[in-house]
Every structure is written in C-alpha cells, then in structure tokens.
Image (cartoon, helix red, strand yellow):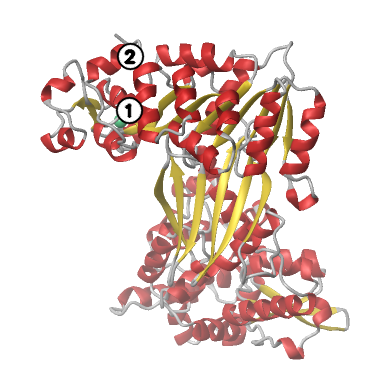
C-alpha cells in the first residue's frame, strides 16, 4: 500500500485526493500547492489521463494547448479528454495503451469522470456516501449501489476503455483446483477469482482491475503471471458463495457461523458486564429478542437478526454439550464461559425449550468472581442476625432451612452461613447442583446425574466423610429430607434450602412429606424465609408519601407509620433511570422454641403456629421486615406490598423496629 502511493504521479496525486477518498493525502501532496503544478489543482477540468498522454508523448504540447483553448470556450461540461478525442488527437487504441500503462496511478472515480460517464459532483456525492457508511466500502461498490452507474455499464466501460477481457465466471466451467478453500477469504476481500490456467498464465477476473491492491493480492496467491480480466462484482460474489455452499454440502453441516459465535460471545460479555443473572433468547414470528434479568427484573436488551437464530442456538448447544441435531425436544446443558477480555469466567446453565416459533434459550449465569457475602451484609436487622447466629448456626447439631421461591437469594444466604461456619476445626462437605460459589477450605461436590453422580448416591457417601456440617444444595424430595433428618439425629449440622413461601410453610411441607412430627420438632432448629426486593437508588431517592390505598392494603392507618421515612427513586444516570440499584433482602426467622415444637407435635394449624411464633419467639414476618426496609427508605413501599405474603396484619412500624433492634 505505501509502495503504491509512492508510485503515484505527483500531478495526479492532488486530483485523486479530491476525487477518491480511498487515498489519504500523502504529506508530499500538500507541497504541490506552492510549485509549478498549482494551476493543475485549480482547474477542475484538468485531466489525470491527459497528463499521462502528454507524459507518454501520445499528444504534443501544442495539441494540448489547443485542446485547452477549445475546452475553455465550451459551454457544456465536457471533459478535456473527450475534447482531445473529438479533435482526433488520439485514437482509442492509443488511449487504451496509455491507460493500461498508467493503471497503477488511476482510480476508478478519476477514470469515470474523465471518460465522461460521471460528473465530479457525482463522485463527490458518492464519496460522501462512502464516508458516512458504517462499514468501509469501495468507491466502485458505492457508485453501483447508489445507482450512479449500473454495474453492467461500469464493467463494459472498464472492459472497453481499458481493454480487459470481460469474462462472467461460471463455477461449472472453471478450473476448481484454482479455488483452494483457504483462499476464499482473500478472494472475497479483494474481489477476484482465478478462472483458468493456460501456458503458465492464470486468468483472473477482477471486480476492479484498476485497483492495484487487489492485483497485488492476486499476485501473491497466484504468481506474477496473471492475465487480468473483468467481471461484475455480483458475479464474483455469487460464484464464491456458490462454491462455499457446494463445499458445505459435501462436508455436512457447517460449523457455527463466525457471526453466530461472535454474537453469542458478545451477548455473554454484555450480560456479565451488566451483572445479569439470566439471559433470555426468545424467538417470535418475525424477530428474535434478547432480554437480561438484572436485579431480579427482566429488561429488554436487544433484537437480533432472526436469520441468525438457528446458528446461535446451534452454537449454544455445542457450548453446552447438548445435541445440535435435536430440535424437537427440550434440552439442557452447561458450560464454562471465559471472557478473555476481562478475564472473568462464569458457569452457565443452558436450557433449550421448544416453542412454536423455534427454540427459546435461557442461560443462567453463575459468575465465579462473585464474593460470598458476610452474614452481616445480607441485610438482616441486628437483632435477627444475633438470634440467627446464636440460636441456629451456633447450635451443635440440627437442621437449618433457608426457604423462598427461585431467585429469592436463598443460595447467597446459604453460602454466607457456610462462610460463617468455615474454620480450621470444622469439616464442611457439600452436595450441590450446581456449585454456585467456590469456597476455600470446604469440600464441594457438584451433582451430575448424567454421569451417575446422583444426589442419592452422594448423600449416602458424604456421611462417611466424617463431616461436622453438611450442606445440601436443596431439599426437593422425601429422600433428601429423610437424609437431612437422619444426619441431624446422628449429631451433624445440616444446612439446606427449601422451596416454600414462608417459614411456617417450610415446616408444613416437611409434615406433608410424611415425615414424623416428632422427628421434625427434634431436629429442625430454625427456618429462615427470605425474598429479595429491589433497592431504591441512593443517588436519586426522594421522600415519598404513601397513598391511602397503599396503607389500606396492609391495614395501616397514619398512626401506624409514625417514624417512617418512605422514599422513591426518581431515576438518574447511576441507576440507568430505573430508580433502583441492587437488591435488599427481607427475612423472616423462625426459631423452633419449646412452644413452637409443642404446636408442631400437636398438629396445630399454620395460623396457630404463626401466632405462637410471633408471641413467644419474637418472630417478625416477611411483610413486617419488608415494611421496616420501606420505612427506612431502602425499598419501595409499593414493591413490599406487592411481593411479600400478607398472612397477618403487620404491627405498626415503630413496634417492628423495636422488635428488630433498630430503635
Ligand atoms: Zn438513581
């Protein structure tokens, strides 16, 4: 490229700079303004080709001066070259010779203007289009795409004026050995195809045989002995596409397209940057939507080209080790994604679900860099934290359950408990599916039923590992519940999560699994229920006055909210104008004291057990804990009312805060 520029005639340099933006002006060009050739630049009708003709001696200086005088008197805008041709100072053959000899210095725009096919205004307009295009295009392509000249006309012009043979390549008639697959990218980039080999010469068709870079690229691949010919760019592109297709048909299904790989990686990177927990890739009739779950809420991310849907899904299936040929059944899988740019990695669980418009993919992202939060930082009030550690985690044995629906943050809390219990004198062993956080100093087992490492099998073996603390990722059936209770009966401490609405519900669910009430009352130490609520952005929070309707829904009067400061986020840059930033936990801690155990043994109703817990064990309900967070401006009152179960009338704010030790 640098070498080519150096060859350019100084005279043409200025003109071409004006005409063809593919050439960045070389420093040398600027100097020309002050030398003898300055008038050349000022005269817009001065011809680069004419300067070649005089240099080659094809026309004399007298002829040129005469032609200039004629040209100056013309009222129509014709090129100097056409005047010279009209005066019969040169023949078409002579012009053709000159053009071919000086091809290195010619640009397609210059040529078309000087031959009278396009005006300089046309070229300037095309250059403006070329500049504003997001992707760099050749001027020839812009001229054709923007209809300044038809492709056919362009090819004919170049073929006629430059004397290149015009060959429309045809895959079935050409020498395919000239098309090694590894060179396809070069062919595409430089717009050429070799079509025949004869007597040591290779005939190559070019979209623009005036482009020296393309010529040089072809020479590098095919040797110096080229016979250049011209073809329409469309014909070249179609031939290469057809050739690639034929290759794929022979070799079977294509590996995932570059573009699909790039888009999948981009989405994963964006999700990690935005701290999304899940990615939803959803097919619809005419579009493919990507949404992220951030802070528990699904938000629109972008639309992607639906034509890429299949290759994207295939790419994700390859990554997740799912069956890419299976498109009729739901599937799942997982993979480790490493973002090379940021060095972050994530364990990704993938689910492929068949919908009427194709496969919907949901990716759950478990980032490994996530820090395990200290128990102090998960959002418990001081009094609750105190009771949870003293009356539950510090007990020598027993079952501690953390309950809540999916996405309630119970796994985060479970790991905070592990971090609290983890010390050099304690053996902690886990059975998880999957391992969401890696904690130093404990033995974590990832359940994988596909290879026979089932939950049941793992539970049988872990009690033989002499553990002090056993962590079960989740209790989901009677077998795992029985195992937990048996382990507790033999003096172990068991922590697990459970999928129930509230703390009392956890006890009832165990009873409904046909586990004896006396086993529950003698092993379960505590049940912690929790939810995550969006936290109000601290940067744009302003005071908020609850509506009468909101107060009515929780059975409050104005008197009940004395001492409360409700807030709402107005939206700012820091929170992307959502008014929220991060999440805050709401908790309900049930400690099984004697009266609660008695209530279980005597099969009291959940209402009774709840009333007893509130009266005797200082239980603050989920709703009450949430209201306390709303009353201190951490969470929106509306969200608290909407998200937390209302099983009994909450006590006044001031009383809740006293119970929570916050007063
Ligand atoms: Zn904000």
Vertical order, 251 against 607 (above or below): below
Residue 269 visible in the current orientation:
yes
Classify 10 Å Cα crowding around label 2: few (below 14), some (14-19), many (20 and above): some
Residue 110 visible in the current orientation:
no
**Sequence order check, earlier mark of 1 and 2:** 1
Task: Give the residue pinned by disc 2.
Answer: 659
In the image, ligand 1 is in what quadrant? top left
Q: Which image quarter: residue 251?
A: bottom right
Distance from Cα at disc 1 to Cα at disc 2: 13 Å
- Residue 357 location, x and y as percent? 49, 71
Residue beneath the point at 31% across and 76% down: 73
Q: Identify the element where label 2 is drawn.
A: helix
Q: Quadrant of the N terminus?
A: bottom right
- Residue 421 location, x and y as percent? 63, 16
Is the residue at mark 2 in contact range of ligand 1, meaning its CB lies under 8 Å from it?
Answer: no
Q: Is residue 640 left or right of residue 604?
A: left
Circle number at residue 330: none
Q: Is residue 346 left or right of residue 247?
A: left
Please name whichever residue, 396 or 102, is drawn nearer the observer in this view of the structure.
396
Vertical order, 54 against 342 (above or below): below
Task: Give the residue pinned by disc 1.
Answer: 626
Q: Which image quarter: residue 174?
A: bottom right
Please name whichever residue, 328 or 153, is drawn nearer the observer in this view of the structure.
328
Q: Identify the element where label 1 is drawn.
A: helix
Residue beneath the point at 76% across and 77% down: 247
Classify 10 Å Cα crowding around label 1: few (below 14), some (14-19), many (20 and above): many
Residue beneath the point at 68% across and 48% down: 335
Q: Which image quarter: residue 486?
A: top right
């Amino acid at each position: 490229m640098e070498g080519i520029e150096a060859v350019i005639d100084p005279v043409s340099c200025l003109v071409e700079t004006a005409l063809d933006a593919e050439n960045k002006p070389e420093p040398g060009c600027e100097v020309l303004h002050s030398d003898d050739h300055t008038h050349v630049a000022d005269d817009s009708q001065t011809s680069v080709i004419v300067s070649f003709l005089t240099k080659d001696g094809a026309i004399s200086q007298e002829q040129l001066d005469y032609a200039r005088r004629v040209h100056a008197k013309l009222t129509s805008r014709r090129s100097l070259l056409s005047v010279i041709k009209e005066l019969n100072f040169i023949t078409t053959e002579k012009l053709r010779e000159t053009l071919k000899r000086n091809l290195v210095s010619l640009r397609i725009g210059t040529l078309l203007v000087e031959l009278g096919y396009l005006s300089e205004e046309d070229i300037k307009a095309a250059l403006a289009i070329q500049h504003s295009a997001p992707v760099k295009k050749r001027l020839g392509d812009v001229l054709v795409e923007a209809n300044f000249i038809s492709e056919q006309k362009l090819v004919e012009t170049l073929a006629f004026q430059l004397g290149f043979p015009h060959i429309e390549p045809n895959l079935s008639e050409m020498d395919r050995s000239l098309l090694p697959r590894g060179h396809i990218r070069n062919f595409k980039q430089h717009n050429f195809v070799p079509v025949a080999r004869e007597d040591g010469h290779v005939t190559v068709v070019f979209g623009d045989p005036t482009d020296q870079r393309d010529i040089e690229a072809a020479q590098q691949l095919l040797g110096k002995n080229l016979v250049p010919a011209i073809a329409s760019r469309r014909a070249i592109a179609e031939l290469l596409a057809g050739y690639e297709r034929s290759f794929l048909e022979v070799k079977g299904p294509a590996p995932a397209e570059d573009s699909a790989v790039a888009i999948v990686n981009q989405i994963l990177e964006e999700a990690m940057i935005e701290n999304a927990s899940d990615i939803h890739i959803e097919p619809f009739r005419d579009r493919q939507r990507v949404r992220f779950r951030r802070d528990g809420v699904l938000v629109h991310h972008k639309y992607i080209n639906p034509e890429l849907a299949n290759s994207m899904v295939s790419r994700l299936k390859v990554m997740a080790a799912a069956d890419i040929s299976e498109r009729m059944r739901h599937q799942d899988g997982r993979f480790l994604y490493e973002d090379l740019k940021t060095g972050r990695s994530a364990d990704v669980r993938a689910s492929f679900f068949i919908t009427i418009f194709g496969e919907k993919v949901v990716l759950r992202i478990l980032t490994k860099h996530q820090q395990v939060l200290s128990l102090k930082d998960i959002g418990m009030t001081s009094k609750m934290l105190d009771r949870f550690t003293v009356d539950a985690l510090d007990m020598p044995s027993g079952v501690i359950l953390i309950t809540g629906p999916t996405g309630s943050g119970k796994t985060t809390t479970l790991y905070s408990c592990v971090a609290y219990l983890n010390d050099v004198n304690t053996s902690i062993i886990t059975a998880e599916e999957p391992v969401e956080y890696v904690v130093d100093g404990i033995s974590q087992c990832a359940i994988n039923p596909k290879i026979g490492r089932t939950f049941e099998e793992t539970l049988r073996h872990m009690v033989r590992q002499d553990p002090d603390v056993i962590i079960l990722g989740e209790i989901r059936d009677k077998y795992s519940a029985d195992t937990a209770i048996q382990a507790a009966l033999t003096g172990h401490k068991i922590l697990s999560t459970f999928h129930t609405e509230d703390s009392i519900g956890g006890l009832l669910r165990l009873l409904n699994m046909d586990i004896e009430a006396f086993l529950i009352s003698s092993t379960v130490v505590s049940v912690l229920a929790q939810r995550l609520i969006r936290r109000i952005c601290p940067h744009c929070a302003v005071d908020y006055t609850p509506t009468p309707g909101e107060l009515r829904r929780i059975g409050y009067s104005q008197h009940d909210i004395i001492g409360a400061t409700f807030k709402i986020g107005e939206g700012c840059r820091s929170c992307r104008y959502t008014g929220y930033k991060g999440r805050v936990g709401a908790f309900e801690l049930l400690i099984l004291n004697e009266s609660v155990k008695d209530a279980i043994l005597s099969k009291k109703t959940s209402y009774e057990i709840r009333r007893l817990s509130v009266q005797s064990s200082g239980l603050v309900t989920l709703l009450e804990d949430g209201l306390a967070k709303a009353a201190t401006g951490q969470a929106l009152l509306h969200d608290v009312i909407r998200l937390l179960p209302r099983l009994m009338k909450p006590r006044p704010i001031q009383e809740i805060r006293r119970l929570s030790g916050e007063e």
